[in-house]
């Protein structure tokens, strides 16, 4: 079951791009992992060769499948890890792959609240009735 919220899980992953076999192939043959990035050469992680195979850029993809993105001391010590799931591929790739995570990227949002408050706020968010739109 998928929930469309800040804590978005789809069969145990945060995002479709977090699946190990996911690849987004652009019209120009460049390969990306996240559709939330600009389609630039800097963000391309590989390309499709003439035989139709994906050729990954080893310098950019080194280490991405060695361990889970949440496998770091900050995430593993967080009581909300089962709900949060740690950083997504995009956040990990841009921010943490070469720099060890020193504090939760969502520190002000979730780390400072206790579990009871988190569950209450999550419930309130999910059951909130959207405001009615006026028709002009």
Image (cartoon, rainbow, N blue to C red):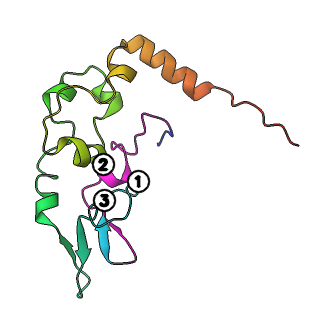
Q: Are marks 1 and 2 in contact (CB under 8 Å)?
A: yes
Question: Residue 70 or 40: which is nearer the viewer?
Answer: 40
The region drawn magenta spans 5-27
Q: Disc 1 or 2, which lies upstream in sequence?
A: 1
Q: Position of residue 112 (x, y in %)?
A: 34, 14
Q: Which quadrant: the C terminus?
A: top right
**Residue 33 belongs to magenta span:** no
10 Å neighbourhood of mark 2: few (<14), some, or many (≥20)?
some
- Between the C-alphas of marks 2 and 3, the distance is 8 Å
Q: Is residue 52 above or below residue 17?
A: below
Tell me the residue at 26%/62% (across/down).
Answer: 42
Q: Are marks 1 and 3 in contact (CB under 8 Å)?
A: no
Question: Residue 17 or 11: which is nearer the viewer?
Answer: 17
Q: Position of residue 84 (x, y in %)?
A: 34, 31
- Between the C-alphas of marks 1 and 2, the distance is 8 Å
Q: Which residue is mark 2?
A: 90
Q: Secondary structure at mark 3?
A: loop
Q: Position of residue 24 (x, y in %)?
A: 35, 66
Q: Which residue is mark 3?
A: 33
10 Å neighbourhood of mark 3: few (<14), some, or many (≥20)?
many
Q: Is residue 82 left or right of residue 35?
A: left
Q: Are marks 2 and 3 in contact (CB under 8 Å)?
A: yes
Tell me the residue at 50%/16% (across/down).
Answer: 120
Tell me the residue at 56%/25% (across/down).
Answer: 125
Q: Nearer the viewer, mark 1 or mark 3?
A: 1
Q: Is residue 65 left or right of residue 29?
A: left
């Amino acid at each position: 079951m998928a929930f469309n919220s800040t804590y978005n899980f789809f069969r145990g992953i945060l995002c479709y791009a977090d699946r190990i076999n996911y690849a987004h192939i652009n019209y120009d043959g460049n390969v990306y992992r996240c559709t939330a990035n600009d389609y630039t050469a800097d963000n391309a992680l590989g390309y499709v060769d003439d035989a139709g195979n994906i050729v990954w850029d080893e310098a950019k993809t080194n280490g991405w499948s060695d361990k889970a993105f949440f496998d770091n001391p900050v995430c593993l010590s967080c009581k909300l890890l089962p709900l949060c799931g740690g950083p997504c591929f995009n956040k990990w790739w841009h921010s943490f792959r070469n720099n060890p995570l020193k504090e939760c990227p969502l520190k002000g949002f979730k780390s400072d609240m206790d579990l009871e408050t988190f569950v209450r706020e999550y419930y309130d968010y999910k059951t909130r009735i959207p405001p009615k739109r006026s028709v002009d």
